[in-house]
Amino acid sequence: KKERKSEKNEPYSDSDSFFFFSLGLSMEDLTNAVKSALKKNDAAAAVKLIKEFLKDQNNIPLKIAITGKSGAGKSTFVNAFREMSDDDEGAALTGVTQTTLQRREYPHPNYPNVMLWDLPGIGTMKFPADEYLELVGFEKFDLFIIISDTCFRENEVKLAKEIQKIKKKFYFVRSKIDNDIQAERRKRDFNEGRTLKKIREKCVQDLRELGIPFPQVFLVSSFERSLYDFPFLREMFERDLHAHKRDALLFAMSDINQKIINEKKETFQSKITFYATLSGAVAGVPLPGLSAAVDIGLIIKVAKEYVAGFGLDKPSLEKLASSSGVPYTDLFAVIKSPLGFFFPFFFFACPIWLFYHQNYCLKAKKDAQRIYFTKLTVPAFP
Ligand SMILES: Nc1nc2c(ncn2[C@@H]2O[C@H](COP(=O)(O)OP(=O)(O)OP(=O)(O)O)[C@@H](O)[C@H]2O)c(=O)[nH]1
Ligand SMILES: [Mg+2]
């Protein structure tokens, strides 16, 4: 049924979406259905599909990247998180020398579609800090855990800032706490609580000084999973899993939407050349007022096409309001808000600007005038 629909390139109807969801729609199916709806300016249908998909959390994939310096304990952390020993079959390889040379995904045992990605260490010969993000395919992950077995330094902060730039979430994990505790235990006035507090405060202070104002830091030992912050990290992960998945899904969907908006923008831009030529041709006709009248007509037509093409016309917004539950007035207010202030300006000013100031418009006008006068004068003066 799905194939037949996509062959015909028809939008997905309500009965289709019910059919898909009752069978368990995959992320790929959802992506295709949302793309198809958005291409047809049906944001309301896209919202409906996404809302349905959000109901079944198991469908939503989540990619968690475990990153940090080489030897920080990333692979050991992945195993600990999956409740495995380092030498179990299927566990991530760990070692005292640089071990992970290729990123690899490991499924979470309890949560379908949650993948832990064990990444190579940052700042090694094979993964220099300035090429690291690109080499590990940084942008594809939804959530990041930045691990360090010492104080957090420039490399970790640089990673965090790059993650902030792409508007995704990250946590800091200070690993191998068992080593610190063991070393401090040798002192006469040892107090575990005080030592942990000291490490935590130092981590937070370092991160603040390097430009991360409110860092969330977990102190863990992958060898002692019931101690320090490991249980708390797990608990928090489970508590926030729903939100993480929702964020990941909405991020992916907004990325699709942005791509489609760009495609539409390019299509509209190529149409402008056509309208400009048309405007130029009309300008060649020496009838007073004709050019201006046609240009105004064209501008209104083009502006209307833009508004409908981006789904900003009244019927589309009303449909979107009813499927998303956001009142129409709120949606419309966004268009009228400071953010949307440039919309009317853009819609009207762009065609005018293009019609009158771009080189090809002027050239088109001149060509049209030349052709018109040649045709007119040649038969009159043989
Ligand atoms: N004491 C202690 N040692 C740890 C802990 N986590 C990891 N290690 C040890 O640290 C070393 C490096 O651990 P890995 O997990 O291989 O480190 P990695 O960050 O994956 O390193 P690369 O793959 O080279 O980037 C290994 O010898 C681990 O046994 C921990 O929580 N406590
Ligand atoms: Mg590793």
Image (cartoon, grey):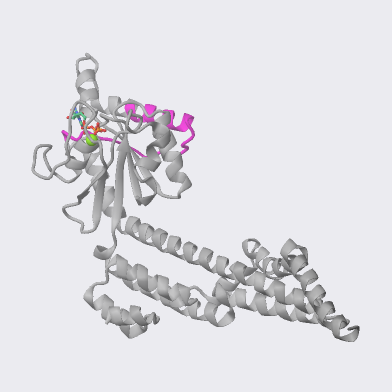
Viewer-side residue, 48 vs 26: 26
- Check the image and report above or below for 243 versus 351: above
Query: Percent from the top left, x then y, of residue 360?
Result: 72, 64
Q: Is residue 324 visible?
A: no
Displayed quadrant of residue 337: bottom right
Displayed quadrant of residue 9: bottom left
Query: Percent from the top left, x then y, of residue 162?
Result: 45, 42
Query: Percent from the top left, x then y, of residue 282?
Result: 78, 79
Q: Residue at x 39, y 75 (%)?
A: 48
- Check the image and report above or below for 112 versus 141: below
Quarter of the rendered structure image containing ligand 2: top left
Displayed quadrant of residue 284: bottom right
Looking at the image, how many numbered discs can be counted on the residues?
Answer: 0
Viewer-side residue, 258 vs 163: 258
- Which stretch did the figure color magenta? 199-224
Q: Is residue 136 visible?
A: yes
**133 left or right of 65 in image:** right
Going by the picture, which residue comes out furthest to the right?
Answer: 381
**289 left or right of 33 in image:** right
- Check the image and report above or below for 72 versus 104: above
Going by the picture, which residue comes out furthest to the front?
Answer: 382
Is residue 9 shown in magenta? no
Viewer-side residue, 313 vs 33: 33
Q: Residue at x 34, y 30 (%)?
A: 200
Quadrant for the C terminus in the image: bottom right
Query: Percent from the top left, x then y, of residue 244?
Result: 34, 55
Is residue 212 shown in magenta? yes
Q: Residue at x 49, y 34 (%)?
A: 211
Q: Residue at x 45, y 50 (%)?
A: 167
**11 left or right of 302 in image:** left
Quadrant for the N terminus in the image: bottom left
